[in-house]
């Protein structure tokens, strides 16, 4: 008997309706997030990531549809309480079984018809541009610092895009778009809870509520999570049985960036929220519009009252705005460094991981455009312009409700990345997932409709 036959006839091939219902239900991402939080609180990060890895192995081996892999992929970075673990060989032993499970998945469920999506070749060109950065510049002294960035933003994103695009399916098991939106929001809520716990503990220890960073996170990273999830909250309101859960979630997400004082995310949300509020008002059920309007009107009134109480004059309020949003954070200086490096090395830049000769610290240019110009030159600029065009075309080639709100997630994330480094951090896996789900539904969903009302069951069924 061949290996393929053995695998196809294995006990893993038996139908497990209860497990399948669980994997496509509301409780699966919520319970998994709770377990991750517990292991994180107990500082059992090895146990936590091993738990996710074992679940991932089960899904890869038993399921053709990889939709249930999204919660595990999303929660994995939030499991770590100490990134020093990556300086050991432990992760190799943890993730080796996952690699084996992926190989088994390809054997058990061979690709029927390869899907080469709109962004596939753009991913390849970007990966090439990342590797070629610093080609004509002596970057041997710091190239090792750029390898994680190249693997994260290039190789890993190409792999994520190709594998999930082949195996994430549109079926009657689950409303893929609602399932994905819910998983992304649960991930952000988990990140907020972790951040607040660390903040409260830090307040007792140092008197400073929010630390500069911890393990996976800093203030800006949480801002990215919120920016990705806010449009998904609005998306889930449309045709929902009740919009109250989404309104409460939206309030928590928005307040979180104010509490942690993530100025960039606050600035972007202030300008974008009115647009999202207006668009969604036109799309939600008529019976929900009064509650919807009253909710946001109350928020505006409370914000005005809070400003009047906190500030004696309008000039005091404007002074605060200037100090938080218009002051120079030091980015002007590093943008000048990136521009000068580009002028000196226009074709391929100086490569990712660049370190200054004075302090030997890796320089992050905190802007997609300046990071690309300084580190990858003209070739990188061309690659990323094409990359942006192809990703945007995924949202614009077919007008659907999900594509509309997914575009806002993309716009908010990339808008922030233009004053930060969002294209070159682990959070890019979430943005890539947004693009994947939009394109999968564009290609594989032959009867695109608005999200349907909730079924009484525990699953996101159509």
Image (cartoon, rainbow, N blue to C red):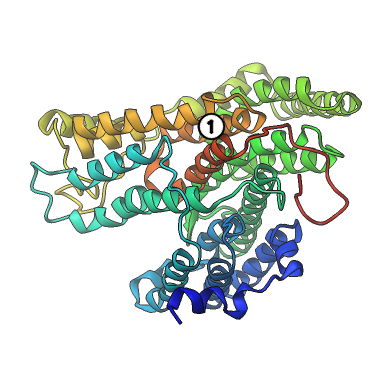
> Front-most of 108 and 350?
108
Quarter of the image where one finds residue 306: top right
Question: Taking 93 as reference, is 231 above or below it?
Answer: above
Estimate the x, y position of residue 112 in percent, counting from the top left. 48, 53
Q: Which residue is mark 1?
A: 412
What residue lies at 61% left-to-right and 73% top-to-bottom? 13
What residue lies at 81% left-to-right and 43% top-to-bottom? 245
Badge 1 marks a residue whose secondary structure is helix
> Front-most of 39 and 118?
118
Q: Quadrant of the C terminus?
A: top right
Judge left or right: residue 185 versus residue 298.
left
Quarter of the image where one finds residue 34: bottom right
Estimate the x, y position of residue 58 in percent, counting from the top left. 57, 72
Question: Taking 434 as reference, is 59 above or below it?
Answer: below
Judge left or right: residue 460 versus residue 162.
right
> Front-most of 369 and 286?
286
Whether residue 215 is visible:
yes
Whether residue 94 is visible:
no
Q: Residue furthest top?
A: 314
Estimate the x, y position of residue 243 in percent, counting from the top left. 83, 37
What residue lies at 71% left-to-right and 62% top-to-bottom? 28
Judge left or right: residue 244 versus residue 347.
right
């Amino acid at each position: 008997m061949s290996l393929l036959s053995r695998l196809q006839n294995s006990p893993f091939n038996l139908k497990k309706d209860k497990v399948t219902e669980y994997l496509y239900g509301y409780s699966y991402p919520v319970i998994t997030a709770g377990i991750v939080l517990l292991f994180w609180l107990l500082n059992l990060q090895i146990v936590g990531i091993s738990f996710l890895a074992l679940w991932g192995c089960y899904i890869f081996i038993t399921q053709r549809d990889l939709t249930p892999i999204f919660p595990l992929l999303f929660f994995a970075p939030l499991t770590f309480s100490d990134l020093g673990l990556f300086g050991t060989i432990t992760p190799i032993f943890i993730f080796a079984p996952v690699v084996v499970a992926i190989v088994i998945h390809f054997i058990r469920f061979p690709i029927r018809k390869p899907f080469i999506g709109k962004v596939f070749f753009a991913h390849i060109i970007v990966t090439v541009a990342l590797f070629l950065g610093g080609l004509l510049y002596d970057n041997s002294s710091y190239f090792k610092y750029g390898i994680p960035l190249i693997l994260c933003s290039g190789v890993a994103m190409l792999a994520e895009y190709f594998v999930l695009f082949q195996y994430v399916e549109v079926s009657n098991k689950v409303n893929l778009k609602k399932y994905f939106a819910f998983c992304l929001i649960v991930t952000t809520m988990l990140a907020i809870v972790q951040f607040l716990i660390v903040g409260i503990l830090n307040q007792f220890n140092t008197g400073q509520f929010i630390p500069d960073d911890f393990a996976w996170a800093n203030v800006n990273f949480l801002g990215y999570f919120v920016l990705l999830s806010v449009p998904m909250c609005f998306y889930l309101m449309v045709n929902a049985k009740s919009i109250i859960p989404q309104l409460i979630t939206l309030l928590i997400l928005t307040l979180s960036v104010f509490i942690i004082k993530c100025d960039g995310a606050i600035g972007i949300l202030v300008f974008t929220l009115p647009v999202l509020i207006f668009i969604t008002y036109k799309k939600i059920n008529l019976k929900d519009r009064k509650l919807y309007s009253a909710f946001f009107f109350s928020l505006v009134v409370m914000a005005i009252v809070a400003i009047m109480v906190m500030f004696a004059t309008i000039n005091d309020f404007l002074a605060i705005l200037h100090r938080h949003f218009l002051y120079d954070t030091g980015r002007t200086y590093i943008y000048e460094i990136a521009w000068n490096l580009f002028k000196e090395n226009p074709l391929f830049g100086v490569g990712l991981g660049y370190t200054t000769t004075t302090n030997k610290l890796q320089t992050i240019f905190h802007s997609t455009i300046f990071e690309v110009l300084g580190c990858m030159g003209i070739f990188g600029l061309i690659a990323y312009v094409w990359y942006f065009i192809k990703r945007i075309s995924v949202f614009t080639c077919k007008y659907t409700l999900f594509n509309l709100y997914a575009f806002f997630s993309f716009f908010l994330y990339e808008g922030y990345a233009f004053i930060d480094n969002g294209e070159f951090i682990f959070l890019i896996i979430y943005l890539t997932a947004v693009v994947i789900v939009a394109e999968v539904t564009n290609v594989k969903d032959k009867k695109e409709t608005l999200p349907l009302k909730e079924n009484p069951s525990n699953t996101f069924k159509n």
